[in-house]
Image: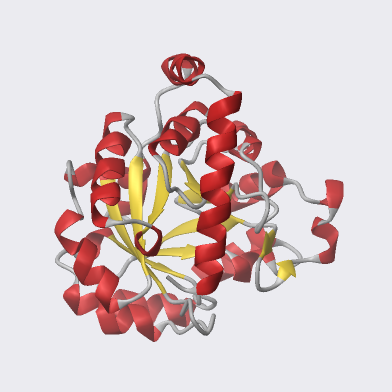
Amino acid sequence: MPAVLSEIVTHKLAEVERAKARIPFRELEAQVAAAEPPRNFFAALTRTDRRSAIIAEIKRASPSAGLIRPEYEGDGFDPSAIARAYTDQGASAISCLTDEKYFSGHLTYLETVKAASPLPVLRKDFIVDPWQLWESRAAGADAVLLIAECLTESRLVDLLILSQQLQMTALIEVHSMDNLLRVRPHIGFPHPAYSLLGINNRDLHTMKVDLNNTLRLVDLVDDPGVLVSESGIRTPDDLARLREAGVKIALVGEHLMRQPDPGQALGQLLA
């Protein structure tokens, strides 16, 4: 595991233990039972009537770049306004960063975004414990990100089973060929309509982004129809290159969030 990811995972494990001590599991179960049913994240992205389906991301900061725009400081960051703009400009789903320490996100953003948009919402965080899946569903998440580099194979399988039981889609993310080969047998487990595969184009050792990472690995994917290309998508030509390789779903975050109007940037990307 790269050093930066190891640091984040160590912090996240401690964060989860503090959450467990603060909120009794019975209370979390009750919140999940009272929550509205999840929106179908998988179906929203695998529809065949769109040339490209975009998961538009709400992201305030990153470990490498810090605050993405100066106006995102304090009350200048408005997830609900960004969610409405993404919805108006043709997003198929929304990804919302909830990690506080490294991405300046917050779990409450999920509720804010869902109140502002009818689209299904992915909780993007570092999921390392089943507790976080219950926490995600209680907070309104329709889908969760599972990063292969953060998880043993047995833990990944356990999380996939629980995600499906909670009726959330799992987006299984890999960065390398080794991890793609490791998780490939589990794509579609335990139910094919609850599982997507993401190939992240960021090298976790150098932090460089290369869209060709998806194009190199796509032939190793059994069903490109459930494949999501993540990071490095900036232009309509990038989406066209992905479509030519059979990839019709993309997650776009930092590129949109760097623009003065993220919604308008999404509209230009899809034009």
Query: Could you say which is closer to the camera, residue 52 or residue 218?
Result: 218
Query: Could you say which is closer to the camera, residue 10 or residue 178?
Result: 10
134 displayed left or right of 12: left
The image position of residue 263, as x and y in percent, is 64, 58
Query: Could you say which is closer to the camera, residue 34 or residue 238?
Result: 34
Residue displayed at 46% across by 80% down:
203
Residue displayed at 26% across by 79% down:
217
The image position of residue 93, as x and y in percent, is 46, 49
Residue 43 in sight in this render: yes
Q: Quadrant of the N terminus?
A: bottom left
Residue 271 in sight in this render: no
183 displayed left or right of 56: left
Q: Is residue 219 above or below residue 133?
A: below
Residue displayed at 19% across by 63% down:
184
Q: Colour scheme of this structure image?
A: secondary structure
Residue displayed at 66% across by 43% down:
106
Q: Quadrant of residue 196?
A: bottom left
Q: Is residue 145 above or below residue 28?
A: below
